[in-house]
Amino acid sequence: MSGCLFIVSAPSGAGKTSLVSALLAADPRVKKSTSYTTRSPRPGEQNGRHYHFVSPAEFDQMLARGELLENALVHGNHYGTSRQTVENDCAAGTDVLLEIDWQGAAQIRKLKPEAIAIFVLPPSLEVLEERLRGRAQDSPEVIAGRLAAARGEIAHASEFDYVIINDDFDRAAQDLISIVRAERLRLPRQVLLHTDLINRLTG
């Protein structure tokens, strides 16, 4: 049986990366897909772990060869997901999580409507700004651009299956963990996983 495909999206600074890390620590059955990007690594980021960092030319070649399941231009940098890696992992029964923006999420859902899409919201734009400034990774100009983009990104939250408001981190993390567990318990998946048991119980 194929694994679940989860999508987690959010405006920059909403806390999705930290929430995804909490999910991965709590649930080893979930595997995060490592995206490709043309942006430069931030302090502490490792190639192949946080992202696959590639040149714009390399990204264009991957796109031309049809190797990307989705791709998007975000804050001036290109991002994309390996088609083969995701499809192989899901076919092997692994639950795969994509941490991508709303543009990529829309592309994935057209190709794979069974994907479960989750959007993370900040409690306010003021808190979002505080978080972006607190990271001390971006210039004031970049932060202003991210805040301007956030409004447009948040407008797409209605296109997702679930919305988590990251006001209290521990509660938001439990919400994300609960969504993953609940999706595994849907009847069609349980019937496929436990056919013999259900047949004995209903026989």
Image (spheres, rainbow, N blue to C red):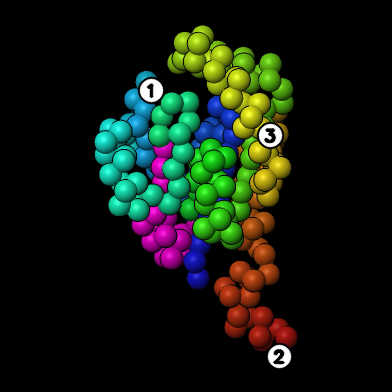
Q: Residue at x 30, y 33 (%)?
A: 56
Q: Which residues are magenta?
A: 79-95
Q: Is residue 144 left or right of residue 171?
A: left
Of the residues shown, which amino acid type is indicated by label 3? Ala
Residue under numbered circle 1: 42
State which tag comes first along the sequence, 3 or 2: 3
Q: How far is the residue under mark 2 from the one under mark 1?
A: 58 Å
| Element type at mark 3 | loop
Residue closer to the observer: 58 or 161: 58
Residue under numbered circle 2: 203
Residue under numbered circle 3: 155
Q: Position of residue 176 (x, y in %)?
A: 63, 44
* Of the two numbered discs 3 and 1 in the rendering, the one whose residue sits closer to the viewer: 3
Judge the density around disc 2: few (<14), some (14-19), many (≥20) Cα neighbours within 10 Å: few
* Of the two numbered discs 2 and 1 in the rendering, the one whose residue sits closer to the viewer: 1
Q: How far is the residue under mark 3 from the one under mark 1?
A: 27 Å
Of the residues shown, which amino acid type is indicated by label 2? Gly
